[in-house]
Image (cartoon, grey):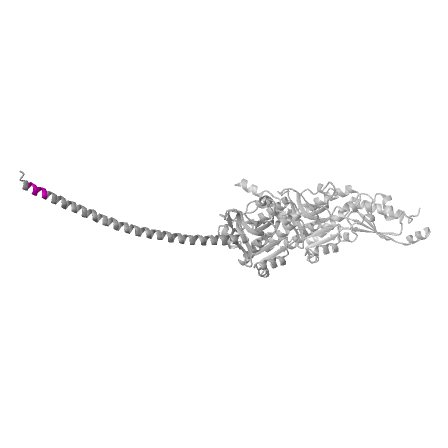
Amino acid sequence: MAARKNRKRLPVLEKVPTGITGFDEITFGGLPRGRPTLICGGPGSGKTLFGMEFLVRGATEYNEPGVFISFEETIEEMTKNVASLGFDLQHLVAAKKLFLDYVHIERSEIEETGEYDLEGLFIRINDAISLVGAKRVVLDTIESLFAGLPNPFILRAELRRLFRWLKTKGMTAVITGEQGTGSLTRHGMEEYISDCVILLDHRVSGQVSTRRLRILKYRGSTHSANEYPFLIDEKGISVLPITTLGLRHTVTSQRISSGIPRLDTMLGGKGFFKGSSILVSGTAGTGKTSIAAQFVSAGCRRGEKCLYCSFEESPSQIMRNMRSIGIDLHTPVKRGRLEFHADRPTLCGLEAHFATMHKLIMRFKPSSVAIDPVSNLNIVSNETDVKMLLMRLLDHMKTEGITILLTTLTTPGLALEQTDVGISSLADTWLLLRDIEQEGERNRALYVLKSRGIAHSNQIREFLLTDHGVDLLDAYVGPSGVLTGTARLAQEAKEREADMMFSKDMESKKLRLENNRKALEAKIAAMRAEFESEAAEVKRLNEQEAARKKEHTALQKTMARMRKAD
Amino acid sequence: MQPKKVKKIKAEMWHLRLYVAGQTSKSIAAFANLKNICEQHLKGKYRIEIIDLLENPQLAKGDQILAIPTLVRKLPQPLKKIIGDLSQTERVLVGLDIRSGANPP
């Protein structure tokens, strides 16, 4: 017992929440309290913003005032730059929650004439800290001192002293450093700050740039070595913590309608599982968007919130098109139940797309999400990446209990099963839409390829877009394969005709048999009459014979008497 | 040209400001060195102001002081900064622009 108590009292590394969306999740709490953290990265990778958001969130959300010492930008520039992210620095400074200082050194003005130290900087920082009672300090980018001050040997020793001093003051510090060639920072800051090192990266691939964040080092804490995509938008930085999720989501057996009654019937009569993932795949023009629209529309009608992410069409175009098949998406949008998110895939990197969707989902909290089509994302990245990210997104949605419907465009001519194998394992239910070309027509067919945990129909159904939405019909399976469209109609007529012919035939056959039977009955009656008359004849003959015998005997007796025999 | 310039500078007052942080050995050395140089080269036309940042930390901001000790030449213009304990006299003279004519042989 005592031992356990002792173990509990072991000092664990205390962490300071940064307030940066997603970052505290991936670091399991934030930055190490009372220690300096190095943020390094190339130009424009978001280092300054990271530091600034750390301070602003600290001041506004965690009641921890902060000091920002800038070596690069003036206070006016900084205030303007972050105003676009909704950070009101002037207000925070006036409220004594933030202290901004601009340290400027001009190399040309400075001559070195012997031993010096950076006590001046220490005093300035110390003064700033005591002025606002700071708990957080950001030095952005302290390495520019190397350009401004001579004698790097003294500078190095002094910086080492500075970081140690910040530690003894209990400051949670963020120090930014420009990435150098072959080293994390130009002047090897990573040698001095070894508690926590975070690398920000800004990569362009296929003309699309993606920001990524990686924790290189975090002493005293577990951390994931993965790269996390992050976004900088009007609300600051948001890191996508979606890789941290495992397969741990709980499931419900609640079912929700697909919006198409006959499809629900095909899925064991009740539709999809709530919180499951549905993949709708098919070639161009097979009605994927219509199924997605019908799905969200049904969700909205149930009073749930739905999100429709489109990578192909604008919201108004979808709404107009869906109105033509009787699906009203205007009303749910007006009521705030349906939200559209439409972007061209090439707008930003894959991660950024997912980050945006992720953020949207977190904010809007929909119960169903449709992504139409995910295959378009292949434009900005390769299939593996898309699959990886989809997996993360799906996992996230599943933990939130969100039902997600993905559509994917398959290339005609290729084996459908093969092209979709990438994301099929992600889907709980896979609906396959198919074109059936026959007799100069192209018709749509739908079938359920798989549906985990649902006894689903194995039938191919013809799929119609009517003015009252999507309708499923029985497909004809004849000797020449599945019949659809007019071929189905013709076949139906043919069968009806054959049916009629058959029943007429039957009637006449019945009549004939009846007649036969009647004839036979008559024959039986006649024969019976004949039989009876013959029986009577036999009887008569028998009687005759008996009489004759009697007479004969009597005659013999008479003859004997007359002959006087015996 | 030369005598005129000398005359002009002679007429000017040198205003020097030395930033220190407490009575450290470096500060004391810097002050002693500065005093020496001024007596030798600027006798009678200089004024030294010593600012102890430990007492007035907010003053560090005005002259953008990082390093201690720092000598700032406020006058004559332009502003010059010399960091270190001023032990390398030659460099101090260059830094203060004393060598470029203001200094009589």
Q: Which residue is located at x 38 percent, y 54 percent?
A: A511
Asked if residue B13 is positioned above or below residue B87 in the image, the reply reads below
Residue A231 in the image, given as x and y percentages of width and height:
66, 50
- Number of callouts: 0
Q: Is residue A245 visible?
A: no
Choose between B20 and A498: the one closer to the eye. A498
Q: Position of residue B30 (x, y in %)?
A: 82, 46
Q: Residue at x 78, y 42 (%)?
A: A152
Task: Decide whether the magenta segment is chiefly helix, strand or loop.
Answer: helix
Point out the stretch of residues depicted in magenta. Answer: A555-561
Camera-side residue of A386 and A279: A279
Residue A162 in which image quadrant:
top right
Q: Is residue A494 within the magenta segment?
A: no
B91 horizontally vs A292: left or right: right
Identify which residue, A412 or A128, lies in the foreground: A412
Confirm whether the magenta stretch covers residue A559: yes
Q: Which residue lies most toward the top here?
A: A566
Give above or below for A104 relative to A5: below
Task: Tell whether A220 sits left or right of A538.
Answer: right
Residue A244 image-quadrant placement: top right
Q: Which part of the image, by quadrant, shows the C terminus of chain A?
A: top left
- Relative side of B7 to A509, left or right: right
Of A482 and A144, the residue lying toward us: A482
Residue A172 appears at what percent x and percent y? 67, 48
